[in-house]
Each structure stands twice: as C-alpha cells, then as structure tokens.
Image (cartoon, helix red, strand yellow):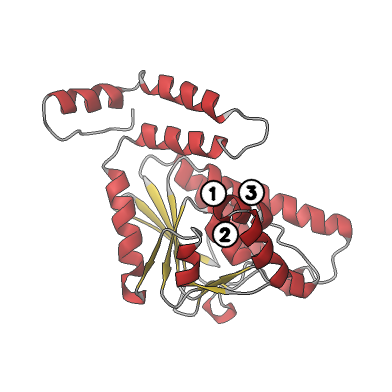
C-alpha cells in the first residue's frame, strides 16, 4: 500500500509510524485509519520489526481527534459500524500487536487521538501535551475504546470525570493518575521512546509477545488471565530463546536472542 496520510520507516528494527496530516492537526480520517491498520499488520508479521514508535507530525498535535466532517450526518447504524470497524481494525489491532507499541505524544491528544495513544502499550508525552476526551461536547461519547481503556488505566471515578466534563488535562496530571508512563521535554520525546524500545530489543522477542498477550488477557471479558499466563509461560519452554537465555545466564554472558 502507498501511504498518503502516514509516514512509515523501519530503522534498526523499530518501525516509525508518523501520522502526517499536520495541517489538520493529524486528525484521523477514514483513509488514515486504513493506512494505520496496514502498518500495524506489517509490524506484527514482519521479522525485521521488534517494536513500533507511533507519533504525529509537527509540534502542535499527536492527533487532535477524528475528522468530524466525515461522520456528521451518520445514522445510528452507520455510527455503530464506524466504531466497530475502527476498534477492530486499528485500536484493538494495536493493543493486540505482538510487538510493543509506544506512543510518543507531542501537543494535543484529544478524542480519537487519546484513544489511539491508550491503545498503545506505553505512552511517552512531552511537557506541552494536553490530553482529553471531548466527545460529549459534540453529543457523542468516545467510540474507539476510550470509555474502556481510560477506565482500565486510571480507574472508574477519574475516567467518568474526564469523559463527562470533557476537560483536558496536562502532561503532569496525566502522569500523576497513571495515564502515561513518562513526561519529558519536547526535544527528548522521540529519544525517550527509542530508549524504551531499544531496551526491549535486547529481550527475547517471543517472550515479549507472550507477556503482552498475558497482560492483555487480564482485561478481556471471558478470558482467565491466569490461565493465559500459564499457557504462555509453558510455551516459552519450547523456544530456542529460552535455551539461549538460560544458557547465557548460567555461563554469565549476554544472551543473543533470535526470536525462535
């Protein structure tokens, strides 16, 4: 696929995805969501990718929201399809990606933008970041998993407050309530995300994927997270990386993992 709305580049086993609609504050339109879905699918299936760094172009916004002009006249049925397809193809796909996905958030992350960041496994934000879910000001609620993931990350009371007041919060507030992992200066944003991903690159790739799957299972209805953990733990014993990791530990040397 030739991308028109995002930039995608693999460097040193990190897939850099940049939402490239700076003139629209990187708002999510249908075409951008299709391209994101394609890029995330590539990341999950490619042996050359060990992690994903997702960010937005420019200094003003990560993603300032969804492109409202595309759905302002939708019916009930069309609205449900919009949410279901977006959640399945993009937001849930990011959360379920077997490679760690880190959001590097600069400036505004509002509505669908915050939902996109919350679908990622970790969030690094710049000091100037503003985060919020303003959908109720449009007569809507978050439709890309925002009500669920925000509650999981910050708890029911704070999630309800943010959603029904539509208030934006600062980077400092976001870190305080556990919504983001780190707050850094603007020039340090990408470097901090790279630091995390480069550290993860040194770990056993199949074990990382199993860990992500087990953690996600703790939040899925109908799944027993403990059972998933036991199953994934057992699978690790059948990998070459397990043999390498334990041998390296016993031989007091650095492990050389191959993802097999």
Q: How far apart are marks 3 and 1 (CA)?
A: 9 Å
Q: How far apart are marks 1 and 2 (CA)?
A: 9 Å
Query: From the viewer's perspective, is the residue at label 2 or at label 3 nearer?
Result: 2
Which residue is located at x 42 percent, y 42 percent? 46
With respect to residue 49, does 124 lie above or below?
A: below
Q: Distance between the residues labelled 2 and 3?
A: 12 Å
Q: Position of residue 131 (x, y in %)?
A: 55, 70
Image quarter (top left, top right, bottom left or bottom right) of the N terminus: bottom right
Query: From the viewer's perspective, is the residue at label 3 or at label 1 nearer?
Result: 1
User: Would you name the residue on which mark 1 appears?
Assistant: 94
User: Would residue 200 be found to the left or right of residue 164 on screen?
Assistant: left
Callout 2: few (<14), some (14-19), or many (20+) C-alpha neighbours within 10 Å?
many
Judging from the image, what secondary structure is the residue with disc 1 in?
helix
Quarter location, residue 47: top left
User: Would residue 14 be found to the left or right of residue 45 on screen?
Assistant: left
Q: Position of residue 211 (x, y in %)?
A: 43, 35
User: Would you name the residue on which mark 2 appears?
Assistant: 116
Q: Nearer the viewer, residue 214 or 152?
A: 152
Judging from the image, what secondary structure is the residue with disc 3 in?
helix
Judging from the image, what secondary structure is the residue with disc 2 in?
helix
- Name which of mark 1 and mark 2 comes first in the sequence: 1
Callout 1: few (<14), some (14-19), or many (20+) C-alpha neighbours within 10 Å?
many
User: Would you name the residue on which mark 3 appears?
Assistant: 89
Callout 3: few (<14), some (14-19), or many (20+) C-alpha neighbours within 10 Å?
some
Q: Do the residues labelled 1 and 2 touch (CB within 8 Å)?
A: yes
């Amino acid at each position: 696929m030739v991308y028109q709305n995002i930039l995608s580049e693999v460097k040193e086993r990190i897939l850099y995805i940049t939402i490239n609609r700076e003139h629209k504050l990187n708002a999510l339109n249908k075409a951008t969501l299709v391209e994101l879905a394609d890029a995330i699918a590539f990341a999950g299936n490619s042996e050359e990718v060990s992690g994903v760094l997702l960010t937005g172009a420019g200094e003003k916004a990560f993603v300032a929201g969804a492109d409202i002009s595309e759905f302002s006249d939708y019916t009930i049925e069309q609205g449900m399809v919009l949410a279901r397809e977006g959640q399945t193809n993009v937001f849930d796909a990011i959360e379920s990606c077997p490679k760690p996905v880190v959001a590097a958030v600069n400036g505004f992350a509002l509505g669908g933008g915050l939902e996109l960041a919350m679908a990622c496994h970790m969030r690094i934000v710049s000091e100037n970041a503003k985060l919020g879910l303003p959908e109720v000001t449009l007569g809507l609620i978050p439709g890309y998993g925002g009500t669920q993931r925000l509650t999981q990350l910050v708890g029911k009371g704070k999630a309800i407050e943010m959603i029904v007041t539509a208030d934006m919060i600062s980077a400092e507030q976001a870190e305080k309530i556990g919504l983001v992992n780190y707050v850094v200066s603007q020039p340090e944003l990408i470097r901090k995300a790279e630091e995390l991903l480069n550290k993860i690159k040194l770990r056993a790739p199949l074990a990382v994927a199993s860990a992500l799957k087990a953690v996600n299972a703790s939040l899925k209805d109908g799944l027993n997270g403990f059972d998933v953990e036991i199953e994934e733990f057992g699978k690790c014993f059948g990998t070459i990386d397990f043999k390498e990791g334990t041998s390296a530990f016993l031989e007091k040397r650095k492990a050389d993992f191959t993802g097999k």
